[in-house]
Image (cartoon, rainbow, N blue to C red):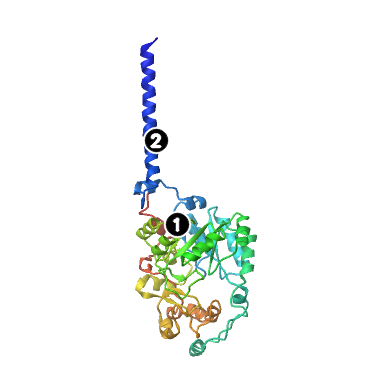
Amino acid sequence: MNWAKFSGSLASVNRRLCFLCVVLSLNLADFAKSFTPNYQPSRTEKKKMPNILMNKLGLRTPIVQAPMAGASNADFVVAACQAGALGSLGAGMMSPDAIADEIAKIKAQTKQAFAVNLMVLDDEQTSKLAGEMPEWLAKKYAELGITPTLDEKPAHDFKAQFAAVLDNPAPVVSFTFGIIDKNAVQALKDKGCIIIGTANYVDEVLAWQAVGADAVVVQGAQAGGHQGGWLHEADEKLDTLTLVEQAKAASDIPLIAAGGIATAEQVAAALAAGADLVAVGTAFLTTHESVISTAWQERLLAASGADTQFTRLFSGKVARGITNDFLREFAQFDGLSSHSEVRSYPTQNAMTKALRAYAGKAADSELMSLWAGTAVAHCQRESIAHLVARLCADLPA
């Protein structure tokens, strides 16, 4: 027997056994951790965890450019996509033809994933006005010398908008103001779409999970613009991190945090609370690529979170914006609860359309709906690429 050769083989076997033991001990340690009560992974372990939703969308960053109806177009969405975010087209107030055109423009400019957002409204809401114009609003028009012309229908037909998206599918289709059924979800999935809902409360998150959505935007009280849920509209709103934590504990669906997020620290906090992605809206409105008016941008750049409030006066649905003379003048009709002197959405929105158009032409921000979230003080003059980069500055490479 060649004892030297035998000893060498034995040593090799011993080395392999030692390596196997180390691997097994590491895996068993990780396995044990998963059963440890209140176990929280370390920063290093979190860094290794795959973000399934981010990977599914093919994103370079966990940032979603929030869909803002009236404040986004194809070029704006493409710029967000090119910066590594999920660009989103706020299409809720667009005609079906306009939606198809904007989707085509986006597809012509980028291969990246992007979202199209629709407002879920029923036929009764969109087909006729819900009452006469409030007396206080009519008097305001007379004071300004404006003769408003109301459209026969207060909003575009949701079914026709939905059909336009089915015929011209986007990689992601998101919804606000309501929920669609399982059949509608499946119809979009059959076209290869990823479906994202919007919720302000945990029961809305669970409702979207039940119909088969792929993710839910959990929108906290700090968010600018309209609250996107459809239940408990008059109830007190939850702050973003609390909502994320509650939704994470109650559901299995991926979550996108939204509301009061405009810095790298706020992005990191939302992800640490359990969000898979983070939606940012207000901070995009003062970028070089922004499509909103100069007057609105100037008010954003001068405001702080304390300058914002919830209001129903412009649209009939709860939304957060910068306080101005219009909101102060008619504050007696405002609040989280609906008022008999304020029509429901979308009728009230249709009735203030002429006022907002007048304000835009006159650059009068005291009559504008200055939608803004509580993180408005962090708005800067910057490119979308710079904004996305600074939002991700505190994230692991």
Question: Image quadrant of residue 271?
Answer: bottom left
Residue occupying the point 35% across, 59% down: 265
In the shown orientation, is residue 159 left or right of residue 219? right
Disc 2, SS:
helix
Task: Decide: is 166 above or below 23.
Answer: below
Give the class, few, some or many, for how many residues have Cα within 10 Å of label 1's Cα (few <14, many ≥20): many
Amino acid bearing label 1: Leu
Q: Which mark is first along the chain, 2 or 1?
A: 2
Q: Position of residue 72 (x, y in %)?
A: 51, 66
Q: Which residue is mark 1?
A: 277
Residue occupying the point 56% across, 66% down: 179
Residue 245 visible to an observer of this rendering: yes
Q: Which residue is mark 2?
A: 24
Residue occupying the point 36% across, 51% down: 37
Q: Position of residue 212 (x, y in %)?
A: 56, 58
Along the line of sight, which residue is nearer the eye, 336 or 148? 336
Amino acid bearing label 2: Leu
Q: Spatial distance from mark 1 to mark 2, Cα to Cα? A: 33 Å
Give the class, few, some or many, for how many residues have Cα within 10 Å of label 2's Cα (few <14, many ≥20): few
Number of marks in the rendered image? 2
